[in-house]
Amino acid sequence: MTENAAQTPSDMPIEVRLADERHACPSGKLGFGKVFTDHVFVAEYGGEGGPGWRDARVVPWRELHMSPAASVLHYAQSIFEGLKAFKGDDGALFTFRPEMHAARFVRSAERLCMPAVPEELFLRAVDKLVRVEEAWVPTAPGASMYIRPTMVATEGFLGVRPAQSYTFFVIVGPVDAYYAEGFAPVKIWVEREMCRVAVGGMGAAKTGGNYAASLYAAERAKKRGYAQVLWTDAKEHRFLEEVGTMNLFVRIGDEVVTPPLDGNILPGVTRDSVLTLLRERGVRVSERAITIDELRQAADAGTLREVFGTGTAAVVSPVGVLGFEDGDLTVADGKPGELSVALHDEVVAIQRGRVADTRGWVHAIP
Ligand code: COI
């Protein structure tokens, strides 16, 4: 159900209706994904209105109104994105590589048989909402505004087929630095029973179902004393895939390995950025399959130097301990590795406009 440009004019206006009462960003701890602003962007597709996106608007925050029979509530036809906005030292507003998120949203939509949101509309919706809520973009070190574009199937119909009506909305909220207690390595359980995705499934799409599939294993790992799981392939549980909700990187000797985008792996924007920065540093980087055996052999040989995850929320998250049925494996000295720290600091500096943007990654919000 790919949207065609003629059905949604590229200069489609976005109406702005401001709330009568506007709140200030609360002071104190924000956490992650708990605080939202006064407005929401909404647009609709299909139904009585026919194909094409319509009624794009920024309106006061409101609950979504939909039929209890809406397809998303039954068959999980939904996709989302996560990106961040930052306020520079001079008050200018930026987002980081928003066009990559817009393009991934189109690919996720295709996998879920949903209409594409034209990239240009996605980008303008994000810019418009962040600009309206600019007073909420935090400036504390590490804090930012998290942006959550989402599309859900709204048709009230219980037959199993792609819905004929959809809502695309964007919500935003200020978030704290991900590491409230510092950049501490996490303990991760290597999951060898359950899986998040399988070959031919939806692993490359950012869709709620993949996250729902991850909850049981993650909760079980927490009960065992681990922060998250390291996902292995669904068939043999030999190949490493992702770590929690993040892409995985393993540094063995002088090589940094990350699993290839084979359909099971989410094509992360931070993953791509970290790969670029590593290559620019002259580090040998391989997008290739890596097994548990290879990881354990490297640990035995003393060549396992770092394991870390990458994602929008935490940027880079070092792994200190990997848990197996026969005991824990400490990664190197259990402290954040030098590349984890350097990559985290470099990405954050680029995002905040503190170093020159030589790669065209930073988008200034008009
Ligand atoms: C990220 O690392 O940015 C994620 O995908 C986590 C998000 C689902 C909260």
Image (cartoon, helix red, strand yellow):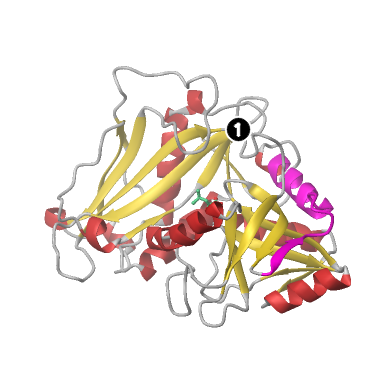
Q: Is residue 19 left or right of residue 26?
A: left
Please name the residue shown 80% across and 48% down the image: 342
Residue with the most extreme bottom position = 236
Please name the residue shown 44% across and 34% down the image: 34
Q: Amino acid at mark 1?
A: Ala
Q: Is residue 258 left or right of residue 56?
A: right
Q: Is residue 122 left or right of residue 88?
A: left
Identify the secondary structure beneath mark 1: loop
Write the start and end of the magenta stretch as one range.
Answer: 326-349
Magenta span includes 328: yes
Residue 266 versus residue 226 in the image, above or below? below
- Mark 1: C-beta under 8 Å from nearest atom of ligand 1: no
Please name the residue shown 76% across and 73% down the image: 296
Residue 87 versus residue 340 in the image, above or below? above
Q: Position of residue 359 (x, y in %)?
A: 70, 52
Tell me, yes or no, if residue 334 can be seen here: yes
Q: Position of residue 295 (x, y in %)?
A: 75, 72
Residue of label 1? 143
Magenta span includes 329: yes
Question: Toward the viewer: 225 or 255?
Answer: 225
Please name the residue shown 80% across and 54% down the image: 339
Q: Position of residue 70 (x, y in %)?
A: 19, 55
Residue with the most extreme front position = 326
Tell me, yes or no, if residue 52 can be seen here: no
Quadrant in which the N terminus appears: bottom left
- Where residue 329 sits, quadrant-wise, is bottom right
Residue 13 versus residue 359 in the image, above or below? above
Question: Toward the viewer: 229 or 41?
Answer: 229
Residue 164 versus residue 291 in the image, above or below? above
